[in-house]
Each structure stands twice: as C-alpha cells, then as structure tokens.
Image (tube, rainbow, N blue to C red):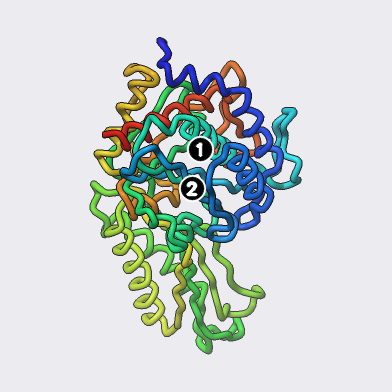
Amino acid sequence: MKKSELLKQAEDMKDWLVDVRRDFHQHPELSTKEFRTHDKIIEHLTELGIEYEANVADTGVVGIIHGTKEGKTVALRGDIDALPITEKNDVSYKSKNEGVMHACGHDAHTTIVLGAAKYLQEHRDQFAGTVKLFFQPAEETIGGAKRMIEAGVMENPKVDAVFGLHVDTFIPTGQIGVRYGQMNASTDTVTLTIKGTNAHGAYPQNGVDSIVVASHVVQALQTIVSRNVDPRDSAVVTLGVIEGGTQSNIIAKEVKITGTVRTLSNETRELVLKRIEDILAHTTKTFGADYTFELDPYGYIALANTDEIVDIVKDSAVNVLGKENVFEVEQASLGGEDFSFFAEAAPSAFFRLGARNEEKGIIHGGHTENFNIDEDALPVGVAMQIQNVLTFLND
C-alpha cells in the first residue's frame, strides 16, 4: 500500500499516540466517573496549547481550535468511559482499576481525537473555520452525547458537521468501513409489571395469577416483529429477565418482565413500543389483572448517517489508504451508539476503523475481557479524522 503523506505524518506521532492510549487504558473509569480521564484530557490540551471548556455534562471536555480564517465549524467526537469488566489480557498496560476495563476501545477513540487535535493545532494555516473536540462521557450508560448537546456544545459557534468512529476488531487494521443511511439501532429498556391477586395455590379461583397472565403477555409480544413490523425493516424484542412468585403453593401477586427493544428507524421504534404497551394493557385486562409499563429514559435513538458526510469519509479513506482498503458495511448494527444524538443534531458520519490483527492475537470482540486493539490503527484513525476535517472545512 502506498502511504499518503498525511498517514506518514500521523505515523510519525505513533509513539506518542501509543503512550497516550496506554495511559488511558491503564486507568479506565466507568460512566459519569471519568474524573482522572477528564483531567488527563485537559492536561494534554494544555500542553498542545488548545483552548478548552471543562466539566461539560459533568465529566466531558470540549476543545476548540481556530483556523486562520473564519468559516464553518466541524466537530470530532471521542467517547471516554469504560466498562465494568475485569481485564484478562496479559499486557504491560493492563487495567489497574480492578473490575473496570476499556473493553470497547474508547481509550483509542479519545487518543485519536487528541492526535488529530495535535496535528490541526500545529497546522491551523491549512484550514478556515473552527474545530471542536468532543470528549464525551457516559456513552455506555445514560447517553452522554445527549447531555453534552443539552449543555450547548453544538452552539457558539454552531456545529455544521460531526465525525465519529469506532474501532472494529472484525475489520483488519488498515481498512475502513463506511455505511450510508442507518448505521446503528435505537435501544430501549422496557419493564413490564403485571399485578394480580394473591391466593392459596389450592384455591386459584380466589386470585388472579400473574404468572399465567405473564405467560400470555410473553407469547403475544413475540408477534410484534413477525406480524406488526414490515418484514423489510428490522426490529428486535428480547425479554431477558422475568421475576415473580414467592412460594410453590401461592398464586403469584406480581411478575416483572424486563427486556430490550432495538429498531433501525424512529418510526418503527414508536410502533414497537406502542404495541408492547397495547398488548400488555389488553392482555392483563382480559384476565382481570393490572399493569405498569416503564420505559428507561436513557434509551438511544437510531443512528442515521448523512450521505454527503459519508461521501467525505469515503473520499478521505481512499486518499489515506487507497480504494482497495475501503468498503461499504452491508448491514446496520443492532447495537446502540449514542453518537446518534449528534447525528440528529447536525449532518454527521460514523464509520468503522479496522483494528484486527490475527498475528498479534487481536481477534476478540468488544465488551469482552480479552478485547484489545492493534495500535497500528491509531495513526490510521488520526489521519482519517484530519482528512475529514480538512476536506469539510476547505470545501
């Protein structure tokens, strides 16, 4: 592969990128608790001479780089939180925080934004406009992206586009995956509580058996995807927890069912959630029971990329890596990603950065105890984001 000049310059900072990434990796912090990470990001921005705003949405940071002329504003997003997983990798930079691990690559995402910032700060004469750096907390839990938007990060100056990426250990290092349209699913947690009436198990006529009612509800919910959602669309209704009853000879008074809902469009999301509550309401009424329906307020909307911004990413990838190393992701992921809120607020593109290297044993998927990335992917991610910024601002 013939390397672009930009990739060569990104590779020149690889040692620095590796040091930064390994420091974050050794000190992972859970969502809303990213205090050291917050301070370390500020330390790096200060060393680079980059203006910043601290404590955005509590533990987030926003950096700002101004070009030599006025123009558009673009943002780069890096999520900063880790997961409650005990790391099993035998590496020198293994997590020092027991039970907490960067098992989703957010340490790499943060490092890549810092690397792009380093270059852009040193080459402000190459672009007009403003670059915002979003170091975002709580991607894994309560939707830090939405909280940052509510804190005003998309304004003053108004952000015209946002670029985000995710490392992917199913894609070889040196390759980029792009997708037009739907990229990630919406995510909702639902809790259904069925309320019956206690009675002695020997005299069931005196009670309303919430377990029986729950069994009918569970069966009926399985028809939503097969009979209410357009077969050409995608949706998942998974019921992961069911709890109820206290003893074998007591009619259960209450059953609680908790599940997840995933859809690829907000219209389908509304349809599925409405059908869940409709089925719950009418089924419980049929049996003389009552119910409550709870929707977790921290659900994520579906992530849809903007075609024109994806075009920029695709062109950047061709310029940085060559056409043979760029491909279109065939199917959207049913995993959640709160970059969706940035994509709702401004034209955006979220893409996949290859980080797999079988020779190095980098083969494990995210959210697992053996997850790791090929650090050769760091300069690639940096070069990609620099090229995205320069193309967008100078077009």
Q: Position of residue 116 (x, y in %)?
A: 49, 33
Q: Is residue 80 left or right of residue 274?
A: right
Q: Closer to the camera, 371 or 279?
A: 371
Q: Position of residue 275 (x, y in %)?
A: 32, 67
* Image point (44%, 48%), residue name: 337
* Image point (50%, 43%), residue name: 78
The residue identified by callout 2 is: 134
Secondary structure of the residue carrying numbered label 2: strand
Q: Quadrant of the N terminus?
A: top left
Q: Is residue 376 left or right of residue 369?
A: left
Q: Is residue 70 left or right of residue 242?
A: left
The residue identified by callout 1 is: 113
Evaluate if marks 1 and 2 touch, with contact meaning CB atoms under 8 Å apart: yes
For marks 1 and 2, the one nearer the N-term is 1
175 in relation to 206, above or below? above
| Number of marks present in the image shown | 2
Secondary structure of the residue carrying numbered label 1: helix
* Image point (46%, 54%), residue name: 145
69 in relation to 359, above or below? below
Whether residue 257 is visible, yes or no, is yes
